[in-house]
């Protein structure tokens, strides 16, 4: 009889532990688990973008982006001019921009991605410095962006982290600078100089 009681108590304790573990893993409504412990709004595919646009010698728009799986893609949308909508970019329009001549060129680890995504909210709240004439001419502009996603509207709001080129501008939040440095590292841009704000 005592053995049975001990067995029942042990079974009950194991059940409680399993239920607690399952509730910790439960996701909030409207989110999807991505890249281990990175939690993103359901449907968000694009996290970061670094692109260069120039119209000095014909239209050029090309760059890189990082998706929810940590894949780094290269794209080139120079074949036709792309106009960004004013505030929230429809997912279809962003997809059209980023998937032209697309090629995977790298990947970041889930841990790295989680650290970067954790900085986006603070960067989005950061004030932007004044636009600065850098003295460069005909460089165009290289934009460093993070994206937030509105699942209800199926659109992306770009968060400017940094702009360098003929005109420069900085997001003054420390999180934005960390993200810019991280993007330079994963894309092999560290050490690039010139046309800085």
Image: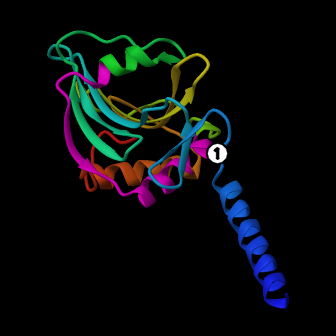
Q: Residue furthest front?
A: 1
Decide which of 105, 160 is in the foreground and name it.
105
Residue drawn at point x = 51 percent, y = 12 percent: 86
Inspect the magenta stretch and tell me whether residue 102 lies in it.
yes
Q: Alpha-carbon neighbours of circle 1 within 10 Å: few (<14), some, or many (≥20)?
A: few
Residue drawn at point x = 31 percent, y = 44 percent: 71
Where does the image place residue 153, in percent across and percent down from the top left? Answer: 58, 16
Where does the image place residue 73, in percent across and percent down from the top left? Answer: 26, 38
Q: Residue furthest bottom?
A: 2
Is 80 placed left or right of 21 in the picture?
A: left
Residue 20: tell me if it is visible.
yes
Quarter of image, res 185: bottom left
Number of numbered discs: 1
Q: Is residue 118 above or below residue 45?
A: below
- SS of the residue under disc 1: loop
Where does the image place residue 46, in percent across and percent down from the top left? Answer: 41, 33
Where does the image place residue 50, in percent across and percent down from the top left? Answer: 34, 36
Decide which of 109, 195 is in the foreground and name it.
109
Give, as a single range, the part of the protein colored magenta: 97-123
Is 93 placed left or right of 26 in the picture?
A: left
Inspect the magenta stretch and tell me whether residue 134 lies in it.
no
Decide which of 139, 6 is in the foreground and name it.
6
Q: Which residue is mark 1?
A: 27
Quarter the C terminus occupies:
top left
Residue 178: tell me if it is visible.
no
Residue drawn at point x = 38 percent, y = 44 percent: 69
């Amino acid at each position: 009889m005592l053995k049975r009681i001990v067995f029942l108590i042990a079974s009950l304790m194991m059940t409680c532990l399993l239920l607690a573990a399952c509730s910790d893993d439960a996701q909030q409504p409207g989110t999807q688990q991505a890249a281990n412990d990175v939690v993103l709004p359901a449907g968000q595919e694009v996290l970061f973008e670094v692109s260069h646009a120039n119209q000095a010698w014909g239209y050029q728009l090309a760059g890189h982006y990082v998706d929810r799986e940590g894949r780094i893609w290269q794209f080139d949308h120079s074949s036709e001019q792309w106009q960004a909508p004013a505030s929230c970019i429809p997912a279809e329009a962003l997809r059209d921009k980023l998937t032209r001549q697309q090629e995977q060129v790298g990947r970041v680890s889930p841990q790295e991605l989680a650290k970067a995504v954790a900085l986006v909210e603070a960067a989005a709240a950061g004030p932007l410095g004044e636009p600065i004439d850098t003295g460069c001419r005909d460089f165009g502009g290289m934009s460093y962006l993070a994206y937030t996603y509105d699942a209800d509207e199926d659109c992306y709001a770009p968060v400017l982290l940094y702009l360098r080129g003929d005109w420069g501008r900085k997001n003054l939040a420390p999180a934005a600078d960390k993200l810019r440095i991280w993007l330079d590292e994963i894309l092999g841009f560290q050490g690039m100089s010139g046309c800085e704000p």
